[in-house]
Amino acid sequence: VIIVVIVIIIIIVVIIIIVVIVIVVIIIVVIVVVIIVVIIIVIIVVIVVIVIVVIIVVIVVIVIVDIVDIIVIIVVVIVVVIVIIVVIIIVIIVVIVVIIIIVVIVIVVIVDIIVVIVILVVVIVVIVILVVVIVVIVIIVVIVVVIIVVIIIVIIVVI
């Protein structure tokens, strides 16, 4: 009965730990996805704002300045746009790398936890088996001793 109770408790604990791990993983994934979405939205908004500002500046400049200045401004705008695109690409790459690192760390931690749980379960099962074996051996020894004592007493009584 005690062994059954111990085994049931172990199973319940393992199930609870696994459920907690799954919940933690789901939460982490949701957080990562939300972060990615927010970053993408921010990047899009920044790009739109920059494009609008650039267009406004170009229009104003066209109205004010002559052709040579317009050419210079177009070149400057192109350079600015290229720089912005490069910066955005670098930011996206950094974000992706950070997310990959976080995911890898989470996976490693989960694997470690599972390994520890498995080791614990194995150790507990081995301990339970050992206890059962010891109890059985003790019972057998007691029975044998009782039988021997009874035989000796019967022999003495007969004699």
Image (spheres, rainbow, N blue to C red):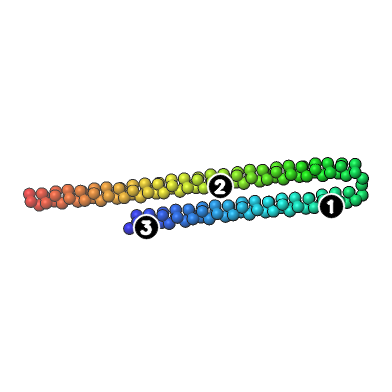
- Amino acid at circle 3: Val
Q: CA distance from mark 1 to mark 2?
A: 46 Å
Which quadrant, please, contains the N terminus?
bottom left
Q: Position of residue 86 (x, y in %)?
A: 73, 42
Tag 2's secondary structure?
helix
User: Residue at point 57% right, 55% down?
Assistant: 27
Q: Residue at x 37, y 57 (%)?
A: 5
Residue nearest the observer in this picture, 85 or 100: 85
Question: Looking at the image, which is closer to me, 144 or 15?
Answer: 15
Q: CA distance from mark 3 to mark 1?
A: 76 Å
Horizontal and vertical percent for residue 113?
A: 50, 47
Q: Secondary structure at mark 1?
A: helix
Q: CA distance from mark 2 to mark 3?
A: 33 Å
| Of the pair 39 and 55, the residue shown nearer to us | 55
Task: Tally the marks.
Answer: 3
The residue that mark 3 highlights is 5
Residue type beneath disc 1: Ile
Dot 1 corresponds to which residue?
A: 56
Left or right: where 71 falls relative to 127: right
Query: Circle 2 sits on which residue?
Result: 106
Q: Position of residue 13 (x, y in %)?
A: 44, 55
Q: Residues within 10 Å of mark 2 (few under 14, many from 20)?
A: some
Q: Nearer the viewer, mark 2 or mark 3?
A: 2
